[in-house]
Image (cartoon, rainbow, N blue to C red):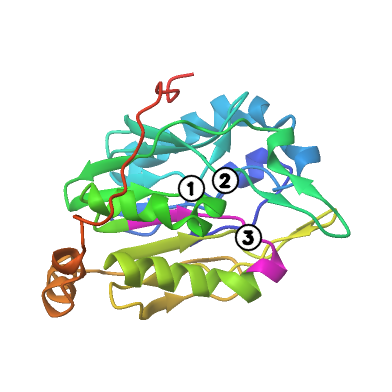
Amino acid sequence: MYQMSVSMDNQQNIAKLKNIPDCDILVLPEMWNCPYHNDALKTAYLRHDESLEALKETARTNKIWIVAGSICTNKYNRCYILNSDGDIVCSYDKTHLFEFHNKQDYCENEVFVPGNHLQCFDTPWGKCGILLCYDIRFPEVSRILAQNGAQILFCPAAFNEQATKKHWKLFTQTRALENEVFLCGVAPAKYTYKNYTSGGHSILVDGFGNIVVELGEEEACKVVDIHLKDIEKVRKRMPYWKVRRNDLYELKEIKNEDNSNQ
């Protein structure tokens, strides 16, 4: 879990990838290479190629998998999954774009268009699923990923300071508990850009909804060991998946045209 601070200087952001501790999977925050503010995001696609190359080099050099938070393409808020050879295993484009109305309105769709597919991926350790930030507020996404076999859900995010205090821990614990999965939510360290302040508090939750690790607001890189056999124990003790009434209800993904290569 790499809770990075984020700068408008992309070389400074990339430089933070140089000293990665020994781990199997590195997880980065949403928009790790650009402040999460529409004024910055509108030109963030210009950072895409150099950021992606830096991710590939980091994976190859350290022989690690990377859940690469997200970076901006010319249309999408995109997370790349890279293996230890630096190859792109898959990508996921954020499907639920943040929208908020109060004294100051904010609409992520001023910059991005939503993706059209959900994404699980296989690793040497087990099957995983990916969410991006606002997706965690929609229980259907996490449930479908778990139905598709994911035992770990990764949620790179950029909740602002107030939403972090009010909702971040609640959502991460709930999604892990109701699906009996590990959930790893990684956010940027606290920083301020114009009227946006990030909240930090990256978190790892187990299948019982217990917090395994929670960081504070400062920049930090934390290595945590987990055991997927713990998921089997949780599901044996509380057999939600067995008790579900699939004869009364169902939830399924509607397959749309895949935009992951656009």
Residue beneath disc 2: 15
- Mark 2 to mark 3 CA distance (whole Å): 24 Å
Q: Quadrant of residue 248?
A: bottom left
Q: Earlier in the sequence, mark 2 or mark 3?
A: 2
Q: Is residue 120 above or below residue 25?
A: above
User: For the residue carrying disc 1, how many other residues have a C-alpha within 10 Å: few (<14), some (14-19), or many (20+)?
Assistant: few
Residue stretch in magenta: 153-163
Q: Is residue 168 above or below residue 83?
A: below
Residue 252 left/right relative to 5:
left
Q: Position of residue 36 (x, y in %)?
A: 70, 48
Q: Nearer the viewer, mark 1 or mark 3?
A: 3
Q: Is residue 239 above or below residue 136?
A: below
- Tag 2: amino acid: Ala
Q: Position of residue 260 (x, y in %)?
A: 43, 25
Q: Quadrant of residue 161?
A: bottom right
66 and 91: which one is in front? Answer: 91
Q: Which mark is residue 235?
A: none
Residue 212 magenta-highlighted: no
Residue beneath disc 3: 159
Viewer can see residue 100: yes
17 and 1: which one is in front? Answer: 1
Q: Nearer the viewer, mark 2 or mark 3?
A: 3
Residue 173 left/right relative to 87:
right
Q: Is residue 15 above or below residue 179?
A: above
Residue at 20% x, 56% y: name it: 246
Q: Position of residue 151 (x, y in %)?
A: 24, 58
- Tag 3: amino acid: Phe
Viewer can see residue 1: no
- Mark 1 to mark 3 CA distance (whole Å): 25 Å
- Tag 1: amino acid: Lys
175 and 247: which one is in front? Answer: 247
Residue beneath disc 1: 18
